[in-house]
Image (cartoon, rainbow, N blue to C red):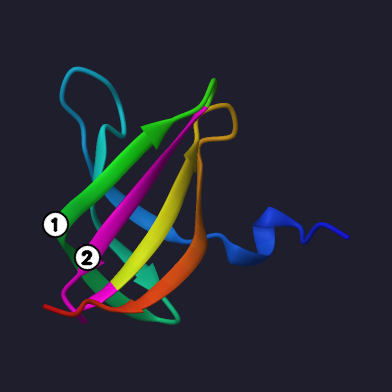
Amino acid sequence: MKIDSRLKVIQVSCYSGYKASERPINFTFRGQKLLVEEILDRWYGVNHSYFKILANDQRVYIIRYDEDEDLWTLEKILGLKIG
């Protein structure tokens, strides 16, 4: 059973350069605004982008941007960055 992606929707502020919503700069999760300290990885699908990011709480997150719906979702929390 697939969980509705709207249950994990997050608010994201982005840098927009050569395209809209090019990369995240901060996001709100559970009422807390977190700053993106580093983009560790990114990969692209047909109409979506994934970002593996290190936030200022020193946790690593995977977030997804759906271009068709203009929607950001939190896909996974990987935990604390070590090292």
Query: Which residue sits furthest front?
Result: 83
Q: Quadrant of the N terminus?
A: bottom right
Distance of mark 1 from mark 2, alpha carbons?
5 Å
Residue at 27% in and 58% down: 53
Q: Amino acid at mark 2?
A: Leu
CB within 8 Å, label 1 to label 2:
yes
**Main SS type for the magenta part?**
strand
Query: What residue sits right under mark 2 in the picture?
Result: 54
Q: Is residue 27 left or right of residue 39?
A: right
- Asked if 49 appears above or below 33 in the picture, the reply is above
Q: Residue at x 11, y 78 (%)?
A: 83
| Depth check, front residue: 40 or 16 | 40
Residue at the spot of label 1: 38
In-front residue for pair 1/47: 1
Residue range (magenta): 48-59
Q: Helix, strand or loop at disc 1?
A: strand
Provide residue 54's location: percent of width, then percent of height.
22, 65
Q: Is residue 15 above or below residue 44?
A: below
